[in-house]
Image: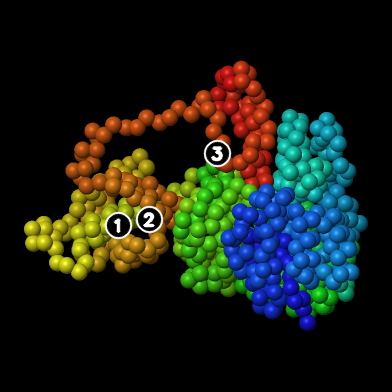
């Protein structure tokens, strides 16, 4: 026996994920949506859908009064909630409990206790869980923040008491950064969680971020479902996750699992939840926070344990005891998850990008691949919500197999219309340090100290790219000469079998000779011959090309009449110009377009809302001075002057 109808107060991939399990269990679903999400995938998947307001989350997905009305109107028996919905809403749900409405998740007491970082830390201490040294109260103002930070000793982490997801968090290394961090964190916390209280604790430098998945019922049973390694992060937000972790031995895993279960039992927790830990290089671990919800990265745990966590949450909410004992929980194989975002990875490892997905194709033809997404071709990525496109998960019997499949899946993923971070994800999973498991939360800034620049081609890879681009150019020339259905008029030139080309890649210009040999091309680059074979289906977004026996999946993203083409090769997009030898010689007479001098203007690197302006016309500003603050996708970004001058 289960619920007849469940309302999902969420959007995107997580709403779709809940609907899938509900369908499997025979439960009818009700989706809520904002007016801009009227055609969203989760709205189409649900049995019923109701609009609860305009685009901003505070007026729609967090609009408690309207959601309560929808629960009554649709007669939903259970509610699955958005992680940001305040405890006051859950309290009002408790009132509805008498009317037979059940909340899928832990009870109000556990959410309030664990949602407040200050209270959760005290509870963890009492439950004999290792905690990070810090100040256990609420910080009143910037002066007090500086005083506390000096007492703890720099560096310190300033974070929102009600926070999560990297929002309202700042690291401070000195007094000035503490004051600035206090200001931004309290503003971000107020706008994201409606609660601007902050706490300060010691910042553990160079740790790993490892979390334990727990599952508990209303009968006092609780299990830990192994760990997830979440150390690859940018701006405190996870990018790549895996289960299990390469770092933990069975003793540390058990110790972390037992402490996580002790904390869950201390707060009478009942549902799926996650206890996050920071782990230092000596395998000392410290409690960070407990997330009282289904985490974004839960699929990797499902892959290695075989459990459906959403189904377990619904069962627990209905009052059933857990079906498993701790000894039943396996680690079968290895799973890796990459978070695919609509972001430009070349700007601070990912600044949000918006637009319409003009073409979208998930790599589901690759074996052992799972994609959790809430979008489809034609969907809009807007400024109002998180820029996540999907979660790409691969599974293997061991880590090497899971990573190899991830590489293949990323190469076969077609996303057009918005910038995306596939180039960064692919570089991370093939990096020698990542492959060896030598990672920490500082992995990205350590490996790319000057920012991410894309894949660095070896000489062989450069020749492969030049040969592939030249072959594509010739295949297209040959296709454009063919008329289907009618023979060509006899005055057509006799068939050409060799081409002299000039290919520009980056700062280099390379002479390339191509000759046709059946369905393949023989290409000479740098005095070396390469054999390039493909079906040359130029209408397909994915092209499988074999170069001297090595298979590569490439994507040609654009081309124009002046020979410019962009090709996604090994995950990174390369801009090339392909011209015939004659055209290349004539092109030096073409005037160069002068680049615009932008040092005198301040241009936002992303769309967003201006939440503060720090200057006025006539002010003198110096280089590096803050001009304004832009809020985009729930994060605040300080915009600074590029040079000294007058506004």
Q: Residue, x 63% and y 43% (percent of image)?
A: 632
* Mark number displayed over residue 286: none
Is 385 in front, or is 588? Answer: 385
Residue where numbered disc 2 is placed: 556
Say if 68 sits above or below 628 in the image: below
Q: Residue, x 78% and y 46% (percent of image)?
A: 194
Q: Are marks 2 and 1 in contact (CB under 8 Å)?
A: yes
Q: CA distance from mark 2 to mark 1?
A: 9 Å
Q: Nearer the viewer, mark 1 or mark 3?
A: 3
**Quarter that holds the N terminus:** bottom right
Residue where numbered disc 1 is placed: 472
Q: CA distance from mark 2 to mark 3?
A: 26 Å
Is 626 in front, or is 436? Answer: 626
Residue where numbered disc 3 is placed: 605
Quick one: label 1 or label 3, which is nearer the N terminus?
1
Q: Secondary structure at mark 1?
A: helix
Is 430 in front, or is 218? Answer: 218
Give the quarter of the image for residue 368: bottom right
Query: Residue 254: x and y, percent?
Result: 78, 67
One can see residue 509 in this view:
yes
Q: CA distance from mark 1 to mark 3?
A: 34 Å
Query: Residue 555: x and y, percent?
Result: 40, 58
């Amino acid at each position: 026996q289960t619920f007849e109808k469940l309302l999902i107060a969420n959007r995107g991939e997580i709403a779709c994920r809940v609907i899938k399990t509900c369908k499997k269990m025979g439960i009818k679903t009700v989706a809520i949506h904002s007016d801009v999400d009227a055609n969203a995938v989760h709205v189409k998947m649900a049995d019923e859908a109701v609009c609860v307001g305009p685009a901003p989350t505070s007026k729609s997905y967090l609009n408690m009064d309207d959601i309560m009305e929808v629960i009554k109107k649709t007669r939903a028996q259970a509610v699955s909630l958005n992680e940001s919905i305040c405890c006051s809403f859950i309290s009002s749900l408790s009132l509805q409990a008498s009317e037979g409405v059940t909340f899928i998740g832990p009870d109000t007491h556990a959410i309030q206790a664990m949602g407040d970082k200050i209270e959760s830390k005290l509870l963890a201490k009492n439950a004999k869980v290792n905690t990070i040294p810090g100040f256990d109260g609420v910080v009143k103002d910037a002066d007090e923040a500086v005083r506390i930070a000096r007492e703890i000793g720099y560096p310190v982490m300033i974070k929102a008491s009600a926070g999560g997801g990297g929002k309202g968090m700042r690291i401070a290394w000195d007094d000035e950064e503490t004051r600035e961090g206090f200001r931004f964190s309290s503003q971000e916390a107020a706008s994201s969680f409606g609660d601007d209280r902050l706490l300060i604790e010691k910042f553990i430098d160079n740790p790993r971020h490892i979390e334990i998945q727990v599952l508990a019922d209303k009968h006092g049973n609780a299990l830990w479902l192994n760990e997830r390694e979440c150390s690859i992060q940018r701006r405190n937000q996870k990018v790549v996750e895996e289960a299990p972790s390469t770092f933990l031995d069975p003793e540390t895993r058990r110790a972390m699992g037992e402490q996580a279960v002790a904390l869950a039992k201390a707060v009478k927790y009942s549902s799926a939840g996650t206890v996050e830990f920071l782990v230092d290089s000596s395998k000392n671990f410290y409690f960070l926070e407990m997330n009282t919800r289904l985490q974004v990265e839960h699929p990797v745990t499902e892959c290695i344990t075989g459990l459906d966590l959403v189904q377990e949450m619904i069962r627990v909410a209905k009052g059933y005891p857990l079906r498993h004992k701790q000894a039943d929980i396996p680690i079968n194989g290895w799973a890796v998850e990459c978070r695919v975002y609509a972001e430009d990875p070349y700007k601070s490892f990912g600044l949000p990008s918006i637009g319409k997905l003009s073409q979208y194709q998930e790599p589901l033809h690759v074996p052992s691949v799972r994609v959790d997404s809430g979008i489809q071709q034609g969907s809009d990525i807007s400024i109002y919500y998180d820029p996540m496109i999907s979660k790409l998960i691969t599974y293997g019997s061991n880590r090497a197999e899971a990573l190899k499949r991830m590489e293949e899946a990323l190469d076969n993923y077609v996303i057009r219309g918005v910038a995306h971070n596939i180039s960064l994800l692919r570089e991370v999973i093939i990096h020698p340090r990542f492959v060896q498991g030598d990672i920490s939360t500082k992995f990205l800034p350590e490996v790319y100290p000057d920012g991410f620049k894309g894949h660095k081609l070896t000489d062989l890879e450069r020749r492969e790219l030049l040969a592939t681009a030249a072959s594509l150019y010739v295949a297209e020339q040959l296709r454009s000469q063919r008329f289907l259905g009618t023979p060509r008029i006899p005055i057509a030139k006799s068939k050409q079998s060799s081409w002299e080309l000039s290919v520009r890649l980056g700062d280099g210009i390379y002479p390339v000779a191509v000759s046709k040999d059946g369905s393949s091309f023989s290409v000479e680059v740098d005095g070396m011959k390469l054999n390039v074979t493909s079906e040359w289906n130029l209408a397909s977004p994915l092209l499988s090309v074999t170069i001297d026996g090595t298979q590569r999946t490439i994507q040609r993203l654009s081309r124009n009449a002046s020979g410019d083409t962009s090709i996604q090769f090994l995950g990174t997009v390369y801009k090339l110009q392909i011209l015939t030898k004659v055209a290349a010689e004539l092109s030096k007479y073409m005037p160069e377009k002068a680049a615009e001098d932008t040092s005198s203007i301040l241009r936002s690197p992303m769309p967003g809302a201006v939440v503060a302006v720090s200057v006025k016309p006539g002010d003198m500003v110096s280089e590096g001075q803050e001009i304004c603050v832009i809020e985009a996708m729930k994060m605040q970004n300080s915009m600074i002057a590029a040079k000294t001058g007058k506004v």
